[in-house]
């Protein structure tokens, strides 16, 4: 966990001006909620379906249907929560009130999900997941919007996002390690594995909520109420913003590439490399080095600007994935080197693109007078979720069409070659598309400074009239 504190140290030569810098300790406190929220991702996507099928007798077909419906529900909930949070006017704050309420729902439903009562029926699982995803959205979307509001500085927003990425990466690392330890102590004990992962989530939830909610004050409520928009107008508002659409498309491509690699990683190491006992270790190695990646890319972002750093990070990942074409079965050295490099490179695009959403929201507020920050972050969340689903839907059928069979002890050389090509070229192409989409992005530091200057002048005008 000491590496988490890396985010608290920045090179003074590349940092924003001191007057605009937020205290490192408060940023860590604000980012604390990323620990339990991110800790839920790995169990939901990797462990829960298998455990509920093997130990609680829920049929696979039913499980697949339930998780598909719940993921669709999560995607629907995000923009609803985003719009409602933007329109909330409460003395507790329009972000705090949603995060606190979402934390209660997230915790109670998490207790029922990770520590199920005697017997798990499809109805029980469906209702619990419905509440869990709703609570998750009630925390995540207002939190991301608030992250873009605690500072209007172009570079400081990258720093804020970096703290959250580092805390989230550390959380994922813990969730990867804990099931491995359980497997060594009590092999095959699914309920214990479920309880350990749920325990991490629940133990960290309350202190994380307190730290996040107390870290910073919310900015003043907008002088003008945000009008409610029908669904069709909301879609047109989002689709009609070309800068936001470029960010969403670029992030979709980034996440698609990352998840094609993640989906096929175990198959590649086990079947193509012939080293199944190395699969978990290499996956863990990538995450270990990934924790230190955020602060590195943050400093590069100070130098080059967000969109140029995103392009650089994506091109680095293109080179790394193309390097996989040179990996020879059974020879581990090059694969280890590329895995470490991938760890350092991962998240570069996601980090910059997340920070850029708040900048685009500022421009929208200047143009229209309406603050739609949470709505913009909610559709950013949808693009990530859609890419995660698309990666599985593209990668697995494609390698199967090329002849690869994960259940076979002896795949043909052609099938293994097909696995290699999808594993290497799929992410490489996706990262190249992501770089192309944000190349030449017009909203750089200078343009954003002008937007913030105009916003600050306009926001100060009503206050001057009231004095």
Image: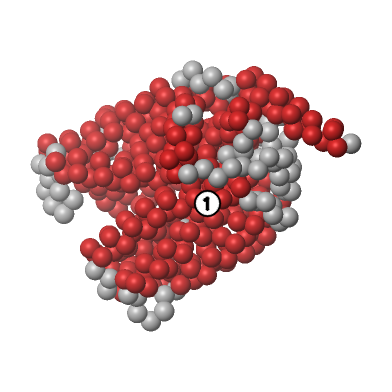
Disc 1 on helix, strand or loop? helix
The answer to whether 329 is drawn above or below residue 121 in the figure is above
Whether residue 102 sits left or right of residue 263 in the image: it is right
Residue 63: quarter of image = bottom left
For the rendered model, the colour scheme is: secondary structure
Q: Nearer the viewer, residue 288 or 370?
A: 370
Q: Nearer the viewer, residue 97 or 43?
A: 97
* Left or right, residue 24 beside residue 189: right
Q: Quadrant of residue 367?
A: top right
Q: Position of residue 165 (x, y in %)?
A: 54, 43
Give above or below for 451 relative to 220: above
Image position of 349 with respect to 289: above or below: above
* Residue located 68% across and 45% down the image: 27
* Left or right, residue 87 beside residue 316: right
The residue shown at (41%, 75%) is: 116
Outermost residue to the right? 467
User: Which residue occupies the extreme bottom position in the image?
Assistant: 118
Residue 84 x %, y %: 56, 50
Q: Quadrant of the C terminus?
A: top right
């Amino acid at each position: 966990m000491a590496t988490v504190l890396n985010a608290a140290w920045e090179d003074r030569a590349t940092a924003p001006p001191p007057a605009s810098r937020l205290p490192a300790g408060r940023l860590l406190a604000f980012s604390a909620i990323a620990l339990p929220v991110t800790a839920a991702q790995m169990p939901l996507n990797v462990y829960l379906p298998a455990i509920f099928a093997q130990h609680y007798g829920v049929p696979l077909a039913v499980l697949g249907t339930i998780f598909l419906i719940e993921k669709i529900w999560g995607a629907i909930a995000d923009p609803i929560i985003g719009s409602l949070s933007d329109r909330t006017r409460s003395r507790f704050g329009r972000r705090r009130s949603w995060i606190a309420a979402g934390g209660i729902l997230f915790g109670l439903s998490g207790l029922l999900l990770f520590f199920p009562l005697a017997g798990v029926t499809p109805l029980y699982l469906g209702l619990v997941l419905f509440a869990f995803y709703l609570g998750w959205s009630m925390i995540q979307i207002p939190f991301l919007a608030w992250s873009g509001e605690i500072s209007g500085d172009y570079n400081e927003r990258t720093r804020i996002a970096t703290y959250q990425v580092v805390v989230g990466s550390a959380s994922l690392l813990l969730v990867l390690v804990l099931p491995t330890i359980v497997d060594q102590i009590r092999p095959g004990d699914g309920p214990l594995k479920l309880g350990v992962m749920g325990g991490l989530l629940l133990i960290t939830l309350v202190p994380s909520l307190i730290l996040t909610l107390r870290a910073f004050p919310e900015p003043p409520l907008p002088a003008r109420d945000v009008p409610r928009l029908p669904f069709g107008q909301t879609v047109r508002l989002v689709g009609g913003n070309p800068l936001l659409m470029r960010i969403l498309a670029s992030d979709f491509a980034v996440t698609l590439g990352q998840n094609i690699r993640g989906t096929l990683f175990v198959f590649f190491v086990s079947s193509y490399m012939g080293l199944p006992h190395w699969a978990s270790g290499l996956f863990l190695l990538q995450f270990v080095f990934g924790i230190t990646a955020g602060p590195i890319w943050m400093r590069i972002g100070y130098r080059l600007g967000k969109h140029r750093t995103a392009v650089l990070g994506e091109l680095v990942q293109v080179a790394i994935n193309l390097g996989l074409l040179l990996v020879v079965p059974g020879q581990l050295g090059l694969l280890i080197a590329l895995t470490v490099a991938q760890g350092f490179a991962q998240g570069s695009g996601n980090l910059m693109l997340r920070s850029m959403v708040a900048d685009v929201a500022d421009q929208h507020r200047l143009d229209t007078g309406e603050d739609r920050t949470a709505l913009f972050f909610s559709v950013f969340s949808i693009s990530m979720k859609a890419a995660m689903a698309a990666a599985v839907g593209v990668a697995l059928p494609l390698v199967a069409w090329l002849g690869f069979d994960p259940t076979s002890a002896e795949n043909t050389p052609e099938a293994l070659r097909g696995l290699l090509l999808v594993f290497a070229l799929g992410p490489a192409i996706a990262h190249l598309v992501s770089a192309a989409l944000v190349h030449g992005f017009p909203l750089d530091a200078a343009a954003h400074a002008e937007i913030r200057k105009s916003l600050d002048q306009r926001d100060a005008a009503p206050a001057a009239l009231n004095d």
